[in-house]
Image (tube, rainbow, N blue to C red):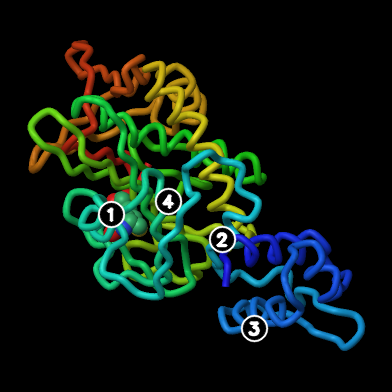
Amino acid sequence: MSKDNRKRIIEMLSNSGEEFISGESISKELGISRAAVWKHINYLKENGYEIEAINKKGYRIVDVNSDVIIPEQITANLDTKFVGQNIKYFQEIDSTNNYAKDNFESLKDGTLIISEYQSAGKGRLGKNWQSNIGEGIWMSLMLKPEIPVYKAPFLTLVAGAAILNAFRNIGVDAEIKWPNDIVLNGKKICGILTEMVAEVERVGCVVIGMGINVNTMLFPGELSEKATSLKKEGFELKRSDIIREIMHEFEKLYTTYIEYGSKEEVISVCRKYSVLIGKDVYIINKNHREKVYCMDISDDGNLIVKHDDGVIEEVISGEVSVRGQNGYI
Ligand code: BTN
């Protein structure tokens, strides 16, 4: 069965909403037999799509609001050149970042790896990332940019700006806590973990892992103080739509950075929606903790801070974490 045809069928069904589409019109449009259409519909049903089939009327998606992830549904209306055009989808995996790093040689540039559940989801600085089934978007974008190694860390901010733009396109007024947390109503809604496979000077691949809390209603222990989900904040959004929007926004910013070396737009988005600028925060580096005032984000993407003695310094993301004076921000 051709994936392209399946993609077109999903597109036709999605775009027709409550209306039925006959098997005959699908088969004519795609130039395939009615039996082939029927096989595609069955595949979709087995993979979580609720499709109503009525004799002489045809097919329609029953629950257009259901939050299943079907790769073809994401790619069906995805207008990117390569970002997210190939998707590896798993029910369970240890970590989508690990899969991307372990298999990058056989994966196409821009491949997106998504899993419903991660048994060993990774956060920054060696922390775990809770990745329960159906609760969020656990995905990694695998990229093969031809850039020197030192240019790769900026891609975390590219992803952050892309997620902010994507969220804002769908009505979610999120902010960014430099360098890798996306925040909604003062709590973390998404984390970004950028990893790289590199030889001395050459980047083999960059993997941008994104964990977005979508449907989680209960966060354990101290996480409940600092984490939230889109649903908890009153947003009922389909994961496929969010993913598609992020891929679309990411490709624009990524291409500008890789092809022209321009950081301008990314920095301006990160400045505009920063939760840190203008605040006193703690910068934590291993066991050392210091209170500083956040002045700005530099044109290179570093955090410009002022120490108590008035000295101004640029902090590079790397190993530091940033904490608010009374908690997360
Ligand atoms: C952080 O805020 O500490 C970063 C969290 C990154 C989590 C995502 S979920 C998908 C991808 N796979 C992983 O193992 N981690 C990232």
Q: Secondary structure at mark 2?
A: helix
Residue 291 sits in quarter? top left
| Residue visible at 47% across and 29% down in the picture | 253
- Residue at mark 2 to residue at mark 4: CA–CA distance: 13 Å
Q: Amino acid at mark 3?
A: Asn
Query: Which structural element holds mark 4?
Result: strand
Label 4 or label 1, whichever lies nearer to me, is 1
Q: Which x, y percent locates residue 203? A: 20, 35
Q: Earlier in the sequence, mark 3 or mark 4?
A: 3
Q: Which residue is mark 1?
A: 106
Quarter of the rendering occupied by the C terminus: top left
Could you classify mark 1 by the number of other residues whose Cα lies within 10 Å: few (under 14), some (14-19), or many (20 or more)?
A: few
First in sequence, mark 2 or 4: give its number: 4
Q: Residues within 10 Å of mark 2 (few under 14, many from 20)?
A: many
Q: Is residue 288 left or right of residue 206?
A: left
The verdict on label 3 being within 8 Å of ligand 1 is: no
Q: Label 4 belongs to which residue?
A: 190
Residue nearest the observer in this picture, 87 or 185: 87
Q: CA distance from mark 4 to mark 1?
A: 28 Å
Q: Residue furthest right?
A: 56
Tags 2 and 4 in contact by the CB under 8 Å rule? no
Tell me which amino acid carries mark 2.
Answer: Arg
| Nearer to us: label 2 or label 1 | 1
Residue with the mark numbered 2: 239
Residue tagged by mark 3? Answer: 42
Pointer 4 with pointer 1, Cβ within 8 A: no
